[in-house]
Image: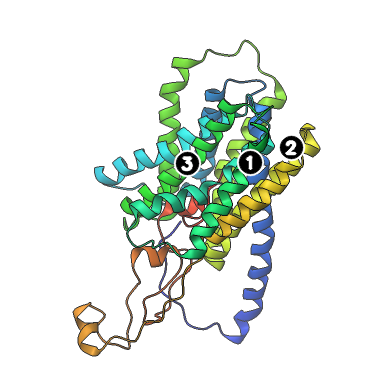
Amino acid sequence: MSPAAPPSAPPSPSSRPARTSRLLDWRVRFGVLALIWGFSFLFIKVGTEGFAPFQVTFGRLLFGTAVLAVAMAVKRDRLPRGARVWGHLTVAAFLLNALPFSLFAYAELTIPSTLAGICNATTPLWGMLLSLVALSEDRPTRVRAAGLGIGFIGVLTVLGAWQGFSGLDVTGTALALLASFSYAVGWIYVRRTLSDTGVSHLSLAGSQVGLATLQLAVVTPLFTSVPESVEVVPLLAVIALGALGTGYAMLLQYGVVAEVGPTTASMVTYFIPVIATAAGVAVLGEQLAWNTPVGAVIVLAGAALTQTRASRRTAPPSRVDASRRGWGSPLRGKAGTRDGALAGASTPLRAPASHGAGPGPEVQAGHAATGTHP
């Protein structure tokens, strides 16, 4: 991904039809992205039928890295430079890829893919809860607090808390929720450390997934052995999981964010559990009790409320205040704050901001800090 470009001039009349065509195209790619990430939980489930969880995770990361490496080579993108950036990318790779991917793979040994997909939707809830402590600029509002409470009521509904969680594998469910929690921690870490690296988003994404692959390459031989036989269907599931869900989907996400901004692109988060549930029931024949879809709707409603932002009415700064802040003059704005860029926002002066701004790994794997890819 390339860094956010400065605002361009208004399109000429001759260029408007092309713009309309692109807008129609992003909707198609948005749907494909939701399908790929929704089916990822099914691919994980099928993959674990022929491989150990660590092997599934290593395979998806390996094929995902291959796709991103090809994309970087085609665009002639360079790898990041500097020990500091690589150090932060190593931590991000663990929190956003190696750890949650492995946890979901182990979770789906004992829980259905539908439940794993719904647990993935709790990431925005964990993210808001953590951001209240870790990010001083995130101030709670009544609506967001209500969303947090509603979301966790939805979690309890999915788990069937009123019947003592009977019939539920507690360990598998806890692992899936821990994977979602790891995503939330990873988003906050990325926001604090990799927002202003000057490196393209594609380069950061490819490097991060590559580092996660190396991490699993070290861990996998220690806990697994080479399979005596390789079944075709699980192998194809792992290839699809990596090449599509971890590689190609990230490229799709980049394109959608670049065209319509991270706020619109983040809406894909709310389609993932719906598709994961439908795929698990239709393809794998998983059973679905009434409380699972009802609880999922409640979770998504709460997650959506946690992403609302209070409107701010800020008076234009005086010329003196503007010069002190380095804006030059009250009529000329500079790029917004780091977190404003994450949401495609601008300064109080309403200077135009480019879509797709923000840290690469956050955009490529988690829709501008509001969600995640499974």
> What label does residue 280 carry, if any?
2
Q: For numbered disc 2, what is the local secondary structure?
A: helix
**Crowding at mark 2 (Cα within 10 Å: few <14, some 14-19, many 20+):** many
Q: For numbered disc 1, what is the local secondary structure?
A: helix
What residue sits right under mark 1 in the picture? 117
What residue sits right under mark 3 in the picture? 181
Horizontally, residue 328 falls left or right of residue 288, namely: left
Nearest the camera: 373 or 27?
A: 373
Residue at (45, 53) in percent of width and height: 128
Residue at (35, 86) in percent of width and height: 315
In the rendered image, which quarter contains the C terminus? top right
Horizontally, residue 117 falls left or right of residue 219, namely: right
Nearest the camera: 351 or 237?
A: 351
Are the two marked residues, 3 and 2, in contact with CB atoms closer than 8 angstroms? Answer: no
Are the two marked residues, 1 and 2, in contact with CB atoms closer than 8 angstroms? Answer: yes
Residue at (67, 63) in percent of width and height: 27
Disc nearest the viewer among 3 and 2: 3
Q: Earlier in the sequence, mark 3 or mark 2?
A: 3
Is residue 76 among the parts visible in the rendering? Answer: no
Q: Earlier in the sequence, mark 1 or mark 2?
A: 1
Is residue 11 among the parts visible in the rendering? Answer: yes
The type of residue carrying mark 2 is Gly
Q: CA distance from mark 1 to mark 3?
A: 14 Å
Q: CA distance from mark 3 to mark 2?
A: 23 Å
